[in-house]
Image (cartoon, grey):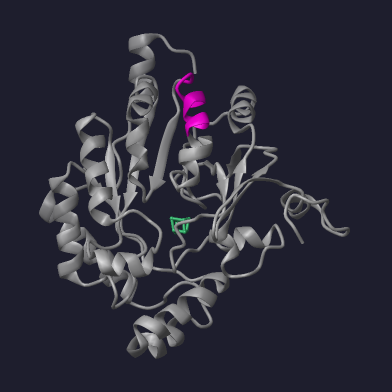
Amino acid sequence: MLFGDSPPPGLVGIAKLAAASEVLEAKTSVEYFEIDCRSALNRTRPGMPFAWSLNPYRGCEFGCRYCYARYTHEFMELRESDDFEDKIYAKSNIGFILKRELMRIDARGGIAIGTATDPYQPAERRFGRTRAALEVFAQQSGLAVSITTKSDLVRRDIALLQEIAKRNSISVNMTITTLDTELARLLEPRAPRPDLRLRAVRELADAGLPVGVFPNPIMPLITDQERRLDRLAKAARDHGATYFGGGVLFLMPCSRRVFFPFVEQHFPHLLRRYRERYENAAYLKGPYRETIQERIAVIRDRYGLSASPPHRDFAALEQQQGWLF
Ligand code: SF4
């Protein structure tokens, strides 16, 4: 079936929208589409550190081998393992929809941009859907917005982020799983190099924006070694990051289908252990997680890093500036 043709009968909801999407651009292996955007903000599950998520794209060209978000393409009946990274959908009208939503919902519980796709993946250079959303946030006040990315393209928007920060809280989480360029290339084949991400951290920090480094997901026996994490935290601190995350790899069934063959190809000596630990459960059980949490806590202390970005006191700001919330 050619994308952009009439959708085949039987498809409903997001799968029907995806099948009917207009082709925006196609290159050798990646195709870009436009998809109707019915809502910009999605409610997150209770217990999450943010109440809303926002993803300006569906699919992510960076193609990380461990990506947990591949299942989101299955909603569109796209089930080939490469579809998630090769068929990218830019949400149409996201700025207009977001602005309308913000007029009728209370979004102060925190908005996380980039929970299921990278908001600064290559498509953003052409289609600017993340920027369109940020332009809306720049007109708001009292919101807490975070952006998670692996891309130095975020540098493009520094002035806009500063504008948002005048009346809102905004922070940037730069994901760097490893400083080893070769390993990063294997794990995250189309994402910017780790040194480029660190350069972006430096520029964000110099611009006065709260920025942290997330080594997530920490992969057992691949990126979890004390010396690797220590080196990464030191580099984060040296480039102006003030916080350092740290979550262990989890593997949904859709991720296992890509990650296990990846381990078999590049780390065959680890395959048996990965299969034993992740074959029947997405999350690791046992003391490993606590060991990693302790390791990260010690490293954070060593470099004076916190676990999360600073939060602005909106009540105080409200009193100072008389904002209405
Ligand atoms: S950058 Fe994030 S969303 Fe994109 S492929 Fe990698 S893990 Fe998945």
Residue 69 lies within the magenta run:
no
Is 45 left or right of 323, judged from the image as shown? right
142 over 221 or under it: above or below: above
Is 114 left or right of 177, judged from the image as shown? right
Residue drawn 59% across the image and 43% down it:
90
The residue furthest right is 9
Closest to the observer, 190 or 270 = 190
Residue 324 horizontal/vertical position (percent): 48, 13
Closest to the observer, 41 or 257 = 257
The residue furthest front is 28
Residue drawn 69% across the image and 58% down it:
75
Residue 208 horizontal/vertical position (percent): 23, 29
Q: How many marks?
A: 0
Closest to the observer, 211 or 302 = 211
Residue 139 lies within the magenta run:
yes
Residue 109 horizontal/vertical position (percent): 49, 35
Magenta segment, prevailing SS (helix, strand or loop): helix
175 over 109 or under it: above or below: below
Q: Quadrant of residue 268?
A: bottom left
The residue furthest top is 322
22 over 284 or under it: above or below: above
Residue 249 horizontal/vertical position (percent): 40, 68
Residue drawn 35% across the image and 61% down it:
247
Quadrant position of the N terminus in the picture: bottom right
Is 75 left or right of 124, judged from the image as shown? right
241 over 136 or under it: above or below: below
Residue drawn 14% across the image and 54% down it:
234
The magenta-colored residue range is 131-140
Where in the image, quadrant-wise, is ligand 1 located? bottom left
